[in-house]
Image (cartoon, coloured by chain):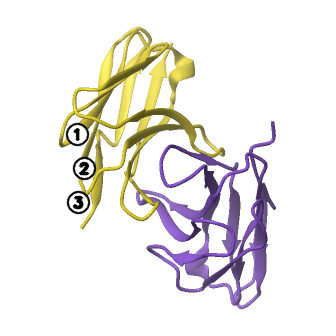
């Protein structure tokens, strides 16, 4: 049971570089989410996808783009990384609009 | 504005010393109250969902309760392995969650 798998686990970027965070779930869930977690601020929603083919902005979308590649995969792209994007990023999935979400292990990103 | 607060920010207990964590919320339309456990360097792990005031759920040494404005996570006779950060989240309209900042629990042997 893999659940939600994120890659990579760690990444260091220089300011201005781009990268894509990958997320895949094997639970046949419809909804997928990207969060960032910063000390003292809790988890904040960046983007979400209610179903395959749809994406919507969350609380902190600036500087990010997403792609719902298929039902299993939801990627997060940083086009031009900034130090303010240093954070731990979590992908999550949920069967539908109700019920609990399941989280991946996270990607720790540092932008220098 | 939908908001979730948790208290205390950090809690240190001796093994066997029972206590409670608080989650207070103000949301326009509650679609579930969720408790998660997060260990260092890992993603949040689901514990409980509560939907109605008066509802209670238990799992081992943990019991979650819900009122119209807050939820409590009661920890009975905790063990060192219960040490973690406990996150509270509320489900809101539009498929989303609002998370609280968490309570860091340390249980000393």
Question: Is residue B82 rendered to the left or right of residue B55?
Answer: right
Secondary element at image label 1: strand
What's the residue at 49%, 38% (across, down)? B36
Looking at the picture, how far across and down is residue A36, in whole percent? Answer: 56, 64
- Please tell me in which quadrant of the rendered image residue A83 appears: bottom right
Q: Is disc 2 surrounded by few (<14), some (14 to 19) or many (20+) residues within 10 Å?
A: many
Q: What residue is shown with label 2?
A: B25
Q: What residue is shown with label 3?
A: B28
Looking at the picture, how far across and down is residue B2, in whole percent? Answer: 27, 62
Q: CA distance from mark 1 to mark 2?
A: 6 Å
Chain in purple colour: A
Callout 1–callout 2 Cβ contact below 8 Å: yes
Color of chain B here? yellow
What's the residue at 73%, 50% (across, down)? A28
Question: Is residue B96 rendered to the left or right of residue B46?
Answer: left
What's the residue at 77%, 59% (across, down)? A72
Q: Is disc 1 surrounded by few (<14), some (14 to 19) or many (20+) residues within 10 Å?
A: some
For the image, the number of numbered tags is: 3
- Marks 1, 3 in one chain: yes
Question: Is residue B25 rendered to the left or right of residue B44?
Answer: left
- Please tell me in which quadrant of the rendered image residue B3 appears: bottom left
- Compared to residue B4, the image places residue B75 above or below, namely above
Write down the chain letter for disc 2: B
Mark drawn on residue B70 = 1
Q: CA distance from mark 1 to mark 3?
A: 14 Å
Q: CA distance from mark 3 to mark 2?
A: 10 Å
Callout 1–callout 3 Cβ contact below 8 Å: no
Nearest the camera: B81 or A64?
A64
- Compared to residue A63, the image places residue B74 above or below, namely above
Q: Earlier in the sequence, mark 1 or mark 2?
A: 2
């Amino acid at each position: 049971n893999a659940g939600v798998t994120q890659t990579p686990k760690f990444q260091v970027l220089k300011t201005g570089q781009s990268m894509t965070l990958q997320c895949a779930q094997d639970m046949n869930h419809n909804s997928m989410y990207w969060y960032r977690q910063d000390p003292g601020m809790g988890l904040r929603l960046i983007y979400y996808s209610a179903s395959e083919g749809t994406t919507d902005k969350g609380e902190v979308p600036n500087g990010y783009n997403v792609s719902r590649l298929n039902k299993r995969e939801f990627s997060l792209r940083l086009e031009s990384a900034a130090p303010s994007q240093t954070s731990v990023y979590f992908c999550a999935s949920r069967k539908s609009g109700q019920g609990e979400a399941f989280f991946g292990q996270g990607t720790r990103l540092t932008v220098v | 504005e939908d908001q979730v607060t948790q208290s205390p920010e950090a809690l240190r207990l001796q093994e066997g010393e029972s206590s409670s964590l608080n989650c207070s919320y103000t949301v326009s339309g509650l679609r579930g109250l969720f408790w998660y456990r997060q260990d260092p360097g890992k993603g949040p792990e689901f514990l409980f969902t509560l939907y109605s005031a008066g509802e209670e759920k238990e799992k081992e040494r943990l019991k979650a309760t819900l009122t119209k404005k807050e939820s409590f996570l009661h920890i009975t006779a905790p063990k060192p392995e219960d040490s973690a950060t406990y996150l509270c989240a509320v489900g809101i309209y539009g498929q989303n969650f609002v998370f609280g900042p968490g309570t860091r629990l340390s249980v000393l042997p």
